[in-house]
Amino acid sequence: MTRVTIIGGGPAGLSAALFAAKNGLDVVVFDTDKTWMHKAHLFNYPGIGSIDGSAFLETARQQAEDFGAERHQGVEVTAIESADDGFAVTAGDDTHEADYLVLATGASRDLAESLGCAFSEDDTVDVDVTMETSVADAYATGAMVRAEEWQAVISAGDGAAAALNILTKEKGDHYHDFDTPDTAADVFGDLRDDEV
């Protein structure tokens, strides 16, 4: 199965995890829980009238887990290397292999730099429209790629774009994740069956 490793558990990382796991990819998320969301209150996120940032994270974490994402809370990734067929990610005492990598570490760009990703003149990670970096199959999202636009909703969109473009590479054509009322019953029924 295709392995996607996501580093960072804020809106970008959790959005990438949700979209990738929901569509059948094997997803692992490493989250040090140092996101700025714990200092936020969202009034500007479409569909949400008002929510504390920490409460938002709990909901987003649960969504990702409900679709099968494996989360490692409080585990820091200390190294990433390109491997023969993907990436070797060192976290804690373990090394994990990944076919795809999504960097969602906020304004911390150290891992992207150590991986050899190209940077823009404003010291952000350079990505194309699919959120892919100069390193094939490595994506960067959120504050890593934006000098000033550090909004949760923008970061979540970046994470979703990265996941959808990974899905496009894996499944062909331009992959869409668009649910309708008739498919919602199938999705939620499957989730309920998994919980029984």
Image: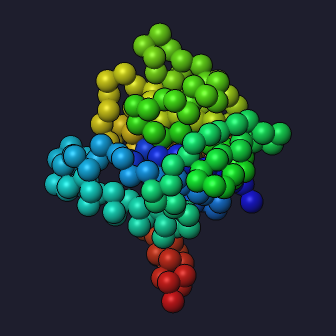
Q: Is residue 141 visible?
A: yes
Question: Going by the image, does 175 lie left or right of 76?
Answer: right
Residue beneath the point at 16% across and 54% down: 50
Q: Can residue 171 be seen in this view?
A: no
Pick the residue in front: 77 or 133.
Answer: 77
Question: Going by the image, does 97 lie left or right of 19?
Answer: right
Please determine whether, in this image, residue 21 is positioned above or below residue 168.
below
At which x and y percent is residue 116? 64, 24
Question: Going by the image, does 61 lie left or right of 111?
Answer: left
At which x and y percent is residue 122? 42, 13
Please determine whether, in this image, residue 107 is positioned above or below residue 23.
above
Quadrant of the image containing the N terminus = bottom right
Residue beneath the point at 18% across and 49% down: 41
Q: Which residue, as the protein is rendered here, is positioned at the far right?
A: 84
Residue beneath the point at 59% across and 51% down: 91
Pick the residue in front: 110 or 175.
Answer: 110
Residue beneath the point at 66% across and 46% down: 89
Please determine whether, in this image, residue 58 is positioned above or below residue 128.
below
Please determine whether, in this image, residue 135 is positioned above or below residue 34.
above
At which x and y percent is residue 134? 64, 24
Quadrant of the rendered image containing residue 105? top left
Pick the residue in front: 114 or 158.
Answer: 114
Quadrant of the rendered image containing residue 23? bottom right
At which x and y percent is residue 170? 72, 48
Quadrant of the rendered image containing residue 118? top right
Q: Which residue, as the protein is rendered here, is positioned at the far top?
A: 121
Total labels drawn: 0
